[in-house]
Image: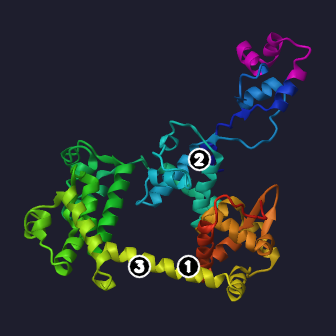
């Protein structure tokens, strides 16, 4: 007996009333008045009156059976009870300490415009959720190698753990000490209240969000220390403690200023109003925004006016920008070569399926809706449409049509792992950008 599922899914989804339901109800009540229908069904008069006149969009499963005298026909619910979804979220966060509910929310809304994460679906303040979210969580576990039976067993075990939403203070204490020692951030800033309340035993646990935020900061700090990125460490400190209005971190322009002093023979004091020693010894950490802006502008101007400078001597920000420019030229040339006859033959070779058609239509591998495939391959939709339009015969052979087109998950996985597929992807990304927006694409799978 699966106690977890029994406990988490006690409530059935509400039944949305369709036009067919209302026509059926009109036939049932033809010989009856609304009061008589309400008495026969055992429902309040006003509820039945509003249902009959189309003012109610959905009713419960029990009320549907009482009113229509039969079970509701099977239909895809627009929203389901969110208890199972929230249990899977708690388990996922329990297994992945470096993630937060906000991270999951942004992942669920991939492709949508940036907005503040709606955390009410996680807290239960919004009781129901779209079925899509529950499927996404099950897919995350499936992709991690956790099948349905194992997932249900883990969820049952999670129920036995005390207060999964709270983390004992002893677990976060060494993390706070590490952040204090390496970043100079006081634990109170992470806890948003006096750390003495925890040290004295008055408070014994922290929220999971606080714990996850501290873990994420610890991992980012360790990475910055390992790579020797002092600028990143300072930015991490600013993220927690906040910056100072009208001022920028000196480390954000240190490389540009050193470059100007060395190659343009500029004086650091003319930019800073004091010597670099004050900043190098840590006695000052910020400079006025207008000073930082002047350093960046003069650095950019000097590089433009001195084309003989080697790439290695440039500040990292300028070096990265010029490397991107060089890569753009290489991508443009590669796109040109791939558009020639030999390149088209090479493209067909890369996109050609590795298995027989029967393997791609096998249900065990699963299918992805056509309009969701670009995200899996890391491509923009227009670029993907162009690629499909130019290789219709290949994508038809690995697709399935049931009212809309689906592509085999096996083929998408195989394609994303193929060597040189990134070249084909970049070719169509560039083609999509260069196409006139008013021109249509003959996408044969729509």
Q: Are marks 1 and 2 in contact (CB under 8 Å)?
A: no
Percent across and percent down for residue 442 are: 76, 64
106, 391: nearer the viewer: 391
Viewer-side label of 2, 3: 3
168, 261: nearer the viewer: 261
Q: How many marks?
A: 3
Viewer-side label of 1, 2: 1
Using the image, determine if residue 7 lies above or below residue 426.
above
Q: Residue furthest front?
A: 305
For label 1, the SS is helix
* First to last magenta residue range: 26-51
> In which quadrant of the rendered view does residue 30 lie?
top right
Q: Earlier in the sequence, mark 2 or mark 3?
A: 2
Q: Earlier in the sequence, mark 1 or mark 2?
A: 2
On residue 332, which mark appears? 1
Q: Is there any visible trace of residue 178 in the rendered image? A: no
Residue occupied by mark 3: 323
Distance between the alpha carbons at the discs numbered 3 and 1:
14 Å
Q: Residue at x 92, y 14 (%)?
A: 31
Distance between the alpha carbons at the discs numbered 2 and 3:
48 Å
On residue 84, which mark appears? 2
Q: Residue at x 44, y 75 (%)?
A: 324
Percent across and percent down for residue 434 are: 60, 68
């Amino acid at each position: 007996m699966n106690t977890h599922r029994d406990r988490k899914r006690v409530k059935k989804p509400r039944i949305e009333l369709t036009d067919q339901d209302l026509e059926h109800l009109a036939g049932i009540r033809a010989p009856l008045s609304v009061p008589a229908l309400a008495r026969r069904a055992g429902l309040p008069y006003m509820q039945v009156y509003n249902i009959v006149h189309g003012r109610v969009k959905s009713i419960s499963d029990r009320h549907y059976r009482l009113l229509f005298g039969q079970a509701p026909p099977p239909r895809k619910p627009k929203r389901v009870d969110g208890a199972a979804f929230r249990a899977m979220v708690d388990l996922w966060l329990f297994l992945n300490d470096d993630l937060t509910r906000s991270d999951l929310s942004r992942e669920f809304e991939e492709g949508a415009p940036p907005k503040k994460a709606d955390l009410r679906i996680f807290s239960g303040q919004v009781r129901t959720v779209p079925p899509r979210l529950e499927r996404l969580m099950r897919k995350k576990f499936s992709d991690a190698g956790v099948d349905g039976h194992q997932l249900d067993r883990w969820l049952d075990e999670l129920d036995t753990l005390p207060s999964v939403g709270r983390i004992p203070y002893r677990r976060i204490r060494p993390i706070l000490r590490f952040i204090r020692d390496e970043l100079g951030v006081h634990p109170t800033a992470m806890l948003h209240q006096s750390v003495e309340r925890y040290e004295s035993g008055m408070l014994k646990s922290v929220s999971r969000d606080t714990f996850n935020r501290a873990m994420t900061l610890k991992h980012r700090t360790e990475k910055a220390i390992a790579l020797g990125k002092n600028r990143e460490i300072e930015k991490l400190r600013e993220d927690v403690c906040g910056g100072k209005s009208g001022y920028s971190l000196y480390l954000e322009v240190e490389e540009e200023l050193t470059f100007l002093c060395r190659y343009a023979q500029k004086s650091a004091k003319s930019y800073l109003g004091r010597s670099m020693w004050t900043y190098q010894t840590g006695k000052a950490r910020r400079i006025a925004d207008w000073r930082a802006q002047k350093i960046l502008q003069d650095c950019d101007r000097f590089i433009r006016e001195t084309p003989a400078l080697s790439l290695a001597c440039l500040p990292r920000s300028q070096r990265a920008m010029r490397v991107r420019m060089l890569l753009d030229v290489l991508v443009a040339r590669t796109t040109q070569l791939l558009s020639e006859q030999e390149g088209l033959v090479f493209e067909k070779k890369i996109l050609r399926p590795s298995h027989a058609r029967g393997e791609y239509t096998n249900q065990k591998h699963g299918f992805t809706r056509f309009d969701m495939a670009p995200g899996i391959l890391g491509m923009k939709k227009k670029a993907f449409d162009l690629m499909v339009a130019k290789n219709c015969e290949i994508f038809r052979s690995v697709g399935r049509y049931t009212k809309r087109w689906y592509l085999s998950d096996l083929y998408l996985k195989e394609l994303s792992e193929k060597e040189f597929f990134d070249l084909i992807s970049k070719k169509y990304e560039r083609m999509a950008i260069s196409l006139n927006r008013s021109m249509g694409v003959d996408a044969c799978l729509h």
